[in-house]
Image: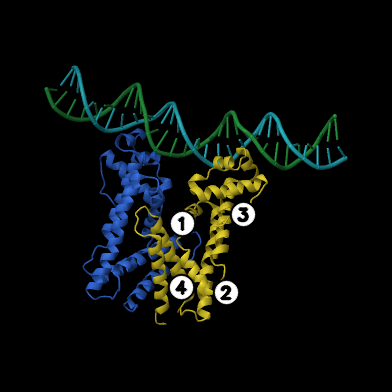
Chain colours: A yellow, B blue, C cyan, D green
Amino acid sequence: MPDPVPPATDRQSRLVEATIELLLEGGLRAVTTRAVTQRAGVGTGLLNHYFRWPELRALAWAQIFEAVARDQFAQADDPEAALERYFATAFTPDARRFWHLWLEATELAASDDFMQAAFRKASAQARTGLADLLAAGAAQGVWRLADPQATALRLGALYDGLAGLLLSPAQILDADQAEAHLRKAFALECEAPTG
Amino acid sequence: MPDPVPPATDRQSRLVEATIELLLEGGLRAVTTRAVTQRAGVGTGLLNHYFRWPELRALAWAQIFEAVARDQFAQADDPEAALERYFATAFTPDARRFWHLWLEATELAASDDFMQAAFRKASAQARTGLADLLAAGAAQGVWRLADPQATALRLGALYDGLAGLLLSPAQILDADQAEAHLRKAFALECEAPTG
DNA sequence: ACGGTTATTGAGCAAGTGCTCAATCGTGTC
DNA sequence: GACACGATTGAGCACTTGCTCAATAACCGT
Protein backbone atom coordinates (compact mmCIF):
# COMPACT_ATOMS: atom_id res chain seq x y z
CA MET A 1 0.00 0.00 0.00
CA PRO A 2 1.68 3.25 -1.12
CA ASP A 3 1.51 6.53 0.68
CA PRO A 4 -1.88 7.83 -0.37
CA VAL A 5 -0.77 11.47 -0.18
CA PRO A 6 2.48 13.34 -0.51
CA PRO A 7 3.74 14.79 2.78
CA ALA A 8 2.07 18.08 3.48
CA THR A 9 3.08 21.02 5.60
CA ASP A 10 -0.10 22.94 6.13
CA ARG A 11 -2.16 21.81 9.06
CA GLN A 12 -5.30 21.12 7.09
CA SER A 13 -3.51 18.47 5.03
CA ARG A 14 -1.77 17.19 8.14
CA LEU A 15 -5.19 16.43 9.59
CA VAL A 16 -6.12 14.35 6.58
CA GLU A 17 -2.77 12.59 6.69
CA ALA A 18 -3.08 11.82 10.38
CA THR A 19 -6.54 10.38 9.83
CA ILE A 20 -5.24 8.14 7.06
CA GLU A 21 -2.33 6.98 9.18
CA LEU A 22 -4.55 6.06 12.10
CA LEU A 23 -7.09 4.43 9.81
CA LEU A 24 -4.40 2.19 8.34
CA GLU A 25 -2.85 1.41 11.70
CA GLY A 26 -5.84 0.66 13.85
CA GLY A 27 -9.00 0.83 11.80
CA LEU A 28 -12.06 2.88 12.58
CA ARG A 29 -11.90 2.31 16.31
CA ALA A 30 -8.52 3.99 16.50
CA VAL A 31 -9.74 7.08 14.70
CA THR A 32 -11.21 9.66 17.04
CA THR A 33 -11.09 13.43 16.88
CA ARG A 34 -8.65 13.51 19.78
CA ALA A 35 -6.39 10.85 18.30
CA VAL A 36 -6.31 12.60 14.96
CA THR A 37 -5.59 16.06 16.33
CA GLN A 38 -2.91 14.68 18.63
CA ARG A 39 -1.25 12.78 15.79
CA ALA A 40 -1.37 15.91 13.65
CA GLY A 41 0.15 17.93 16.49
CA VAL A 42 -2.78 20.27 16.55
CA GLY A 43 -5.40 21.52 18.96
CA THR A 44 -8.68 19.68 19.13
CA GLY A 45 -10.62 22.68 17.99
CA LEU A 46 -8.82 22.99 14.68
CA LEU A 47 -10.42 19.89 13.29
CA ASN A 48 -13.83 21.47 13.50
CA HIS A 49 -12.51 24.67 12.05
CA TYR A 50 -11.67 22.90 8.80
CA PHE A 51 -13.95 19.87 8.72
CA ARG A 52 -16.98 18.18 10.06
CA TRP A 53 -15.81 14.95 11.58
CA PRO A 54 -17.74 12.52 9.34
CA GLU A 55 -16.56 14.52 6.36
CA LEU A 56 -12.89 14.16 7.30
CA ARG A 57 -13.29 10.48 8.02
CA ALA A 58 -14.90 9.81 4.65
CA LEU A 59 -12.31 11.99 2.91
CA ALA A 60 -9.42 10.05 4.40
CA TRP A 61 -11.03 6.76 3.53
CA ALA A 62 -11.65 7.85 -0.07
CA GLN A 63 -8.00 8.87 -0.47
CA ILE A 64 -6.82 5.49 0.77
CA PHE A 65 -9.07 3.71 -1.65
CA GLU A 66 -8.10 5.82 -4.62
CA ALA A 67 -4.44 5.10 -4.02
CA VAL A 68 -5.11 1.37 -3.90
CA ALA A 69 -7.35 1.39 -6.95
CA ARG A 70 -4.72 3.37 -8.84
CA ASP A 71 -2.26 0.56 -8.15
CA GLN A 72 -4.36 -2.56 -8.36
CA PHE A 73 -5.13 -2.71 -12.07
CA ALA A 74 -2.31 -0.55 -13.32
CA GLN A 75 -1.00 -2.30 -16.47
CA ALA A 76 -4.32 -3.21 -18.06
CA ASP A 77 -2.69 -3.32 -21.51
CA ASP A 78 -1.20 -6.74 -20.68
CA PRO A 79 -4.18 -8.61 -19.24
CA GLU A 80 -2.29 -11.79 -18.45
CA ALA A 81 0.37 -10.00 -16.41
CA ALA A 82 -2.21 -7.79 -14.76
CA LEU A 83 -4.31 -10.75 -13.67
CA GLU A 84 -1.25 -12.56 -12.45
CA ARG A 85 -0.39 -9.50 -10.39
CA TYR A 86 -3.95 -9.38 -9.08
CA PHE A 87 -3.70 -12.98 -7.91
CA ALA A 88 -0.21 -12.61 -6.49
CA THR A 89 -0.99 -9.52 -4.44
CA ALA A 90 -4.56 -10.44 -3.52
CA PHE A 91 -3.85 -11.62 0.01
CA THR A 92 -0.75 -9.78 1.12
CA PRO A 93 -0.87 -8.30 4.63
CA ASP A 94 -1.42 -4.87 3.12
CA ALA A 95 -4.33 -6.13 1.08
CA ARG A 96 -5.80 -7.74 4.13
CA ARG A 97 -5.52 -4.56 6.16
CA PHE A 98 -7.19 -2.70 3.35
CA TRP A 99 -9.95 -5.25 3.16
CA HIS A 100 -10.60 -4.79 6.88
CA LEU A 101 -11.00 -1.07 6.31
CA TRP A 102 -13.35 -1.84 3.45
CA LEU A 103 -15.46 -3.95 5.76
CA GLU A 104 -15.69 -1.23 8.37
CA ALA A 105 -16.61 1.23 5.64
CA THR A 106 -19.46 -1.02 4.53
CA GLU A 107 -21.03 -0.83 7.94
CA LEU A 108 -20.40 2.84 8.44
CA ALA A 109 -21.87 3.65 5.04
CA ALA A 110 -25.23 2.46 6.30
CA SER A 111 -25.53 5.42 8.68
CA ASP A 112 -23.10 7.98 7.28
CA ASP A 113 -23.93 9.86 4.10
CA PHE A 114 -20.38 11.03 3.43
CA MET A 115 -19.10 7.49 3.76
CA GLN A 116 -21.88 6.17 1.58
CA ALA A 117 -20.98 8.50 -1.25
CA ALA A 118 -17.30 7.57 -1.04
CA PHE A 119 -18.23 3.92 -0.84
CA ARG A 120 -20.42 4.02 -3.92
CA LYS A 121 -17.66 5.55 -5.99
CA ALA A 122 -14.99 3.19 -4.68
CA SER A 123 -17.19 0.17 -5.18
CA ALA A 124 -17.83 1.05 -8.80
CA GLN A 125 -14.13 1.54 -9.48
CA ALA A 126 -13.23 -1.80 -7.92
CA ARG A 127 -15.71 -3.76 -9.97
CA THR A 128 -15.09 -2.16 -13.32
CA GLY A 129 -11.34 -2.61 -12.80
CA LEU A 130 -11.53 -6.38 -12.73
CA ALA A 131 -14.32 -6.57 -15.28
CA ASP A 132 -12.39 -4.50 -17.81
CA LEU A 133 -9.32 -6.61 -17.24
CA LEU A 134 -11.16 -9.86 -17.84
CA ALA A 135 -12.95 -8.45 -20.87
CA ALA A 136 -9.66 -7.26 -22.35
CA GLY A 137 -8.11 -10.68 -21.92
CA ALA A 138 -11.12 -12.34 -23.50
CA ALA A 139 -11.01 -9.95 -26.44
CA GLN A 140 -7.32 -10.70 -26.99
CA GLY A 141 -7.96 -14.42 -26.74
CA VAL A 142 -5.76 -14.85 -23.67
CA TRP A 143 -8.60 -16.75 -22.01
CA ARG A 144 -12.10 -17.84 -22.92
CA LEU A 145 -14.94 -16.54 -20.78
CA ALA A 146 -18.62 -16.87 -21.55
CA ASP A 147 -19.49 -13.69 -19.64
CA PRO A 148 -16.50 -11.67 -18.37
CA GLN A 149 -18.81 -9.32 -16.47
CA ALA A 150 -20.38 -12.17 -14.52
CA THR A 151 -17.02 -13.83 -13.95
CA ALA A 152 -15.61 -10.58 -12.60
CA LEU A 153 -18.48 -10.30 -10.19
CA ARG A 154 -18.12 -13.87 -8.97
CA LEU A 155 -14.35 -13.58 -8.71
CA GLY A 156 -14.65 -10.31 -6.83
CA ALA A 157 -17.20 -11.77 -4.46
CA LEU A 158 -15.06 -14.86 -3.93
CA TYR A 159 -12.15 -12.58 -3.15
CA ASP A 160 -14.19 -10.81 -0.50
CA GLY A 161 -15.26 -14.08 1.03
CA LEU A 162 -11.75 -15.50 1.09
CA ALA A 163 -10.39 -12.30 2.58
CA GLY A 164 -13.05 -12.58 5.25
CA LEU A 165 -12.04 -16.13 6.06
CA LEU A 166 -8.44 -15.03 6.20
CA LEU A 167 -9.33 -12.27 8.61
CA SER A 168 -11.63 -14.26 10.83
CA PRO A 169 -10.40 -15.37 14.25
CA ALA A 170 -11.04 -18.98 13.32
CA GLN A 171 -7.89 -19.68 11.33
CA ILE A 172 -9.05 -21.76 8.40
CA LEU A 173 -6.90 -20.54 5.56
CA ASP A 174 -3.50 -19.09 5.04
CA ALA A 175 -2.80 -16.58 2.30
CA ASP A 176 -1.36 -19.16 -0.09
CA GLN A 177 -4.42 -21.35 0.12
CA ALA A 178 -6.70 -18.39 -0.42
CA GLU A 179 -4.74 -17.42 -3.50
CA ALA A 180 -4.91 -20.99 -4.80
CA HIS A 181 -8.68 -21.03 -4.38
CA LEU A 182 -9.00 -17.78 -6.27
CA ARG A 183 -6.86 -19.11 -9.12
CA LYS A 184 -8.81 -22.36 -9.18
CA ALA A 185 -12.11 -20.54 -9.41
CA PHE A 186 -10.81 -18.53 -12.35
CA ALA A 187 -9.62 -21.72 -14.03
CA LEU A 188 -13.08 -23.21 -13.64
CA GLU A 189 -14.63 -20.16 -15.23
CA CYS A 190 -12.28 -20.50 -18.19
CA GLU A 191 -12.57 -24.19 -18.88
CA ALA A 192 -16.32 -24.11 -18.79
CA PRO A 193 -18.01 -25.01 -22.07
CA THR A 194 -19.68 -21.97 -23.62
CA GLY A 195 -23.44 -21.77 -23.07
CA MET B 1 -35.07 -17.28 11.21
CA PRO B 2 -36.90 -19.12 13.98
CA ASP B 3 -37.19 -18.01 17.56
CA PRO B 4 -33.83 -18.99 18.98
CA VAL B 5 -35.22 -19.60 22.47
CA PRO B 6 -38.60 -20.55 23.90
CA PRO B 7 -40.28 -17.72 25.81
CA ALA B 8 -38.94 -17.55 29.34
CA THR B 9 -40.39 -16.12 32.49
CA ASP B 10 -37.42 -15.73 34.80
CA ARG B 11 -35.56 -12.49 34.45
CA GLN B 12 -32.23 -14.03 33.68
CA SER B 13 -33.60 -15.66 30.53
CA ARG B 14 -35.53 -12.51 29.72
CA LEU B 15 -32.22 -10.66 29.57
CA VAL B 16 -30.84 -13.13 27.04
CA GLU B 17 -34.05 -12.94 25.02
CA ALA B 18 -34.01 -9.16 25.01
CA THR B 19 -30.41 -9.16 23.83
CA ILE B 20 -31.26 -11.52 20.99
CA GLU B 21 -34.26 -9.45 19.99
CA LEU B 22 -32.26 -6.24 19.85
CA LEU B 23 -29.41 -7.96 18.07
CA LEU B 24 -31.75 -9.17 15.33
CA GLU B 25 -33.56 -5.85 15.08
CA GLY B 26 -30.72 -3.38 15.03
CA GLY B 27 -27.40 -5.17 15.12
CA LEU B 28 -24.62 -4.57 17.56
CA ARG B 29 -25.07 -0.81 17.68
CA ALA B 30 -28.58 -1.21 19.05
CA VAL B 31 -27.45 -3.52 21.83
CA THR B 32 -26.41 -1.60 24.93
CA THR B 33 -26.83 -2.51 28.57
CA ARG B 34 -29.50 0.13 28.97
CA ALA B 35 -31.41 -0.96 25.87
CA VAL B 36 -31.33 -4.59 26.95
CA THR B 37 -32.43 -3.98 30.52
CA GLN B 38 -35.19 -1.68 29.38
CA ARG B 39 -36.42 -4.21 26.83
CA ALA B 40 -36.33 -6.89 29.48
CA GLY B 41 -38.25 -4.63 31.85
CA VAL B 42 -35.55 -4.82 34.44
CA GLY B 43 -33.26 -2.51 36.40
CA THR B 44 -29.88 -1.73 34.90
CA GLY B 45 -28.06 -3.32 37.80
CA LEU B 46 -29.57 -6.74 37.30
CA LEU B 47 -27.64 -7.37 34.13
CA ASN B 48 -24.38 -7.19 36.03
CA HIS B 49 -25.78 -9.37 38.74
CA TYR B 50 -26.19 -12.27 36.33
CA PHE B 51 -23.68 -11.56 33.57
CA ARG B 52 -20.67 -9.67 32.47
CA TRP B 53 -21.75 -7.62 29.50
CA PRO B 54 -19.41 -9.18 26.89
CA GLU B 55 -20.47 -12.59 28.15
CA LEU B 56 -24.16 -11.88 27.64
CA ARG B 57 -23.55 -10.42 24.24
CA ALA B 58 -21.58 -13.45 23.09
CA LEU B 59 -24.16 -15.80 24.64
CA ALA B 60 -27.01 -14.18 22.74
CA TRP B 61 -25.05 -14.28 19.52
CA ALA B 62 -24.19 -17.94 19.99
CA GLN B 63 -27.85 -18.82 20.55
CA ILE B 64 -28.86 -17.04 17.38
CA PHE B 65 -26.27 -18.88 15.40
CA GLU B 66 -27.11 -22.28 16.79
CA ALA B 67 -30.74 -21.82 15.84
CA VAL B 68 -29.75 -20.92 12.29
CA ALA B 69 -27.24 -23.74 11.96
CA ARG B 70 -29.84 -26.18 13.25
CA ASP B 71 -32.09 -25.15 10.39
CA GLN B 72 -29.74 -24.57 7.51
CA PHE B 73 -28.58 -28.09 6.74
CA ALA B 74 -31.45 -29.97 8.31
CA GLN B 75 -32.29 -32.79 5.88
CA ALA B 76 -28.76 -33.91 5.03
CA ASP B 77 -30.03 -37.38 4.11
CA ASP B 78 -31.29 -36.01 0.79
CA PRO B 79 -28.33 -33.96 -0.49
CA GLU B 80 -30.04 -32.73 -3.62
CA ALA B 81 -33.02 -31.32 -1.74
CA ALA B 82 -30.78 -29.94 0.99
CA LEU B 83 -28.57 -28.11 -1.49
CA GLU B 84 -31.60 -26.80 -3.33
CA ARG B 85 -32.88 -25.48 -0.03
CA TYR B 86 -29.50 -23.92 0.69
CA PHE B 87 -29.57 -22.06 -2.62
CA ALA B 88 -33.21 -21.06 -2.32
CA THR B 89 -32.89 -19.60 1.17
CA ALA B 90 -29.37 -18.24 0.80
CA PHE B 91 -30.33 -14.61 0.26
CA THR B 92 -33.66 -14.15 1.95
CA PRO B 93 -34.02 -11.01 4.08
CA ASP B 94 -33.60 -13.12 7.20
CA ALA B 95 -30.39 -14.61 5.84
CA ARG B 96 -29.09 -11.18 5.02
CA ARG B 97 -29.85 -9.87 8.48
CA PHE B 98 -28.09 -12.86 9.89
CA TRP B 99 -25.10 -12.29 7.66
CA HIS B 100 -24.88 -8.70 8.86
CA LEU B 101 -24.72 -9.98 12.42
CA TRP B 102 -22.05 -12.40 11.36
CA LEU B 103 -20.01 -9.56 9.94
CA GLU B 104 -20.25 -7.57 13.13
CA ALA B 105 -19.29 -10.63 15.09
CA THR B 106 -16.17 -11.05 12.97
CA GLU B 107 -14.98 -7.63 13.95
CA LEU B 108 -15.93 -7.93 17.58
CA ALA B 109 -14.21 -11.30 17.86
CA ALA B 110 -10.90 -9.56 17.25
CA SER B 111 -11.06 -7.82 20.62
CA ASP B 112 -13.54 -9.87 22.63
CA ASP B 113 -12.58 -13.30 23.93
CA PHE B 114 -16.12 -14.46 24.60
CA MET B 115 -17.13 -13.54 21.09
CA GLN B 116 -14.07 -15.19 19.66
CA ALA B 117 -14.87 -18.51 21.30
CA ALA B 118 -18.45 -18.40 20.06
CA PHE B 119 -17.26 -17.41 16.63
CA ARG B 120 -14.80 -20.26 16.36
CA LYS B 121 -17.45 -22.81 17.18
CA ALA B 122 -20.02 -21.27 14.87
CA SER B 123 -17.55 -20.97 12.04
CA ALA B 124 -16.61 -24.64 12.29
CA GLN B 125 -20.27 -25.69 12.26
CA ALA B 126 -21.04 -23.59 9.23
CA ARG B 127 -18.19 -24.98 7.17
CA THR B 128 -18.63 -28.64 8.03
CA GLY B 129 -22.36 -28.32 7.34
CA LEU B 130 -21.86 -27.47 3.69
CA ALA B 131 -18.82 -29.73 3.26
CA ASP B 132 -20.67 -32.76 4.61
CA LEU B 133 -23.60 -32.02 2.37
CA LEU B 134 -21.44 -31.80 -0.75
CA ALA B 135 -19.48 -34.90 0.22
CA ALA B 136 -22.69 -36.87 0.77
CA GLY B 137 -23.98 -35.87 -2.63
CA ALA B 138 -20.72 -36.85 -4.26
CA ALA B 139 -20.73 -40.19 -2.50
CA GLN B 140 -24.26 -40.89 -3.71
CA GLY B 141 -23.35 -39.83 -7.22
CA VAL B 142 -25.83 -36.94 -7.27
CA TRP B 143 -23.02 -34.70 -8.52
CA ARG B 144 -19.37 -35.08 -9.43
CA LEU B 145 -16.86 -33.01 -7.46
CA ALA B 146 -13.10 -33.42 -7.55
CA ASP B 147 -12.71 -32.11 -4.02
CA PRO B 148 -15.96 -31.52 -2.09
CA GLN B 149 -14.06 -29.95 0.80
CA ALA B 150 -12.44 -27.33 -1.44
CA THR B 151 -15.69 -26.72 -3.29
CA ALA B 152 -17.48 -26.18 0.01
CA LEU B 153 -14.91 -23.64 1.04
CA ARG B 154 -15.11 -21.75 -2.25
CA LEU B 155 -18.89 -21.88 -2.29
CA GLY B 156 -19.04 -20.67 1.30
CA ALA B 157 -16.63 -17.85 0.58
CA LEU B 158 -18.55 -16.88 -2.54
CA TYR B 159 -21.70 -16.83 -0.48
CA ASP B 160 -20.08 -14.44 1.98
CA GLY B 161 -18.90 -12.19 -0.81
CA LEU B 162 -22.28 -12.14 -2.55
CA ALA B 163 -24.03 -11.43 0.72
CA GLY B 164 -21.64 -8.55 1.25
CA LEU B 165 -22.43 -7.11 -2.18
CA LEU B 166 -26.11 -7.52 -1.44
CA LEU B 167 -25.71 -5.62 1.81
CA SER B 168 -23.46 -2.87 0.55
CA PRO B 169 -24.90 0.60 0.00
CA ALA B 170 -23.89 0.47 -3.65
CA GLN B 171 -26.76 -1.60 -4.98
CA ILE B 172 -25.17 -3.95 -7.48
CA LEU B 173 -27.11 -7.16 -7.06
CA ASP B 174 -30.55 -8.24 -6.09
CA ALA B 175 -31.18 -11.47 -4.24
CA ASP B 176 -32.17 -13.39 -7.37
CA GLN B 177 -28.97 -12.51 -9.18
CA ALA B 178 -26.89 -13.45 -6.16
CA GLU B 179 -28.62 -16.81 -5.99
CA ALA B 180 -28.03 -17.34 -9.71
CA HIS B 181 -24.33 -16.62 -9.31
CA LEU B 182 -24.09 -19.09 -6.45
CA ARG B 183 -25.80 -21.79 -8.51
CA LYS B 184 -23.62 -21.02 -11.51
CA ALA B 185 -20.46 -21.35 -9.43
CA PHE B 186 -21.62 -24.73 -8.18
CA ALA B 187 -22.38 -25.81 -11.72
CA LEU B 188 -18.86 -24.84 -12.78
CA GLU B 189 -17.41 -26.89 -9.94
CA CYS B 190 -19.42 -29.91 -11.09
CA GLU B 191 -18.75 -29.79 -14.79
CA ALA B 192 -15.01 -29.44 -14.27
CA PRO B 193 -12.93 -32.29 -15.61
CA THR B 194 -11.42 -34.33 -12.79
CA GLY B 195 -7.79 -33.56 -12.05
C1' DA C 1 -41.35 -14.17 63.94
C1' DC C 2 -36.62 -14.27 62.89
C1' DG C 3 -32.18 -14.35 60.20
C1' DG C 4 -29.94 -14.93 56.12
C1' DT C 5 -29.39 -15.40 51.46
C1' DT C 6 -30.52 -13.94 47.07
C1' DA C 7 -32.93 -10.80 43.78
C1' DT C 8 -33.51 -6.19 42.39
C1' DT C 9 -33.23 -1.31 41.99
C1' DG C 10 -31.45 3.19 40.20
C1' DA C 11 -28.56 7.10 41.26
C1' DG C 12 -24.17 7.92 40.19
C1' DC C 13 -19.16 7.13 38.69
C1' DA C 14 -15.41 7.05 35.38
C1' DA C 15 -14.17 6.97 30.86
C1' DG C 16 -14.86 8.19 26.25
C1' DT C 17 -17.17 10.53 22.32
C1' DG C 18 -17.87 14.79 18.99
C1' DC C 19 -18.23 19.44 19.30
C1' DT C 20 -18.47 24.58 21.08
C1' DC C 21 -16.67 28.93 22.05
C1' DA C 22 -14.44 32.71 24.22
C1' DA C 23 -9.87 33.71 24.21
C1' DT C 24 -5.40 34.15 22.09
C1' DC C 25 -1.87 34.21 18.37
C1' DG C 26 0.00 35.49 13.75
C1' DT C 27 0.11 37.94 9.80
C1' DG C 28 -0.82 41.00 6.41
C1' DT C 29 -3.05 45.96 5.27
C1' DC C 30 -3.69 50.62 5.48
C1' DG D 1 1.34 51.50 15.03
C1' DA D 2 -3.42 50.18 14.60
C1' DC D 3 -6.65 47.44 12.85
C1' DA D 4 -8.87 43.30 10.93
C1' DC D 5 -9.37 38.73 10.20
C1' DG D 6 -8.32 34.01 9.77
C1' DA D 7 -5.74 30.41 12.37
C1' DT D 8 -5.35 28.11 16.62
C1' DT D 9 -6.04 26.72 21.29
C1' DG D 10 -7.98 23.87 25.13
C1' DA D 11 -11.17 23.91 28.91
C1' DG D 12 -15.50 22.48 29.07
C1' DC D 13 -20.34 20.89 27.57
C1' DA D 14 -23.63 17.37 26.46
C1' DC D 15 -24.03 12.90 25.57
C1' DT D 16 -23.24 7.81 25.69
C1' DT D 17 -21.06 3.84 27.30
C1' DG D 18 -20.38 -0.23 30.89
C1' DC D 19 -20.34 -0.78 35.50
C1' DT D 20 -20.61 -0.09 40.89
C1' DC D 21 -22.79 -0.12 45.19
C1' DA D 22 -25.50 0.96 49.09
C1' DA D 23 -30.22 0.32 49.84
C1' DT D 24 -34.33 -2.26 49.54
C1' DA D 25 -37.51 -6.16 48.48
C1' DA D 26 -38.56 -10.97 48.24
C1' DC D 27 -38.10 -15.45 49.50
C1' DC D 28 -36.99 -19.48 52.42
C1' DG D 29 -35.60 -22.47 56.16
C1' DT D 30 -35.88 -22.63 61.13
Provide the residue designation for mark 2. A77
Residue at x-position 42% and y-position 63% = B161
Query: Secondary structure under badge 4?
Result: helix
Q: Quadrant of residue B127?
A: bottom left
Kindly identify the amino acid type of the residue bearing the numbered disc 2.
Asp
Respond whether the residues carrying marks 2 and 4 are from the same subunit.
yes
What is the x, y in percent for residue B129?
27, 62
Provide the residue designation for mark 3. A5
Chain hosting mark 3? A
| Mark 3 to mark 4 CA distance (whole Å) | 34 Å
Q: Quadrant of the N terminus of chain B?
A: bottom left
User: Of the residues under marks 3 and 2, which one precedes in the sequence?
Assistant: 3
Report the disc number at residue B105: none
Q: Residues within 10 Å of mark 3 (few under 14, many from 20)?
A: some
Kindly identify the amino acid type of the residue bearing the numbered disc 3.
Val
Between residues A31 and B38, which one lies in front from this camera angle?
A31
User: Of the residues under marks 2 and 4, which one precedes in the sequence?
Assistant: 2
Provide the residue designation for mark 4. A150
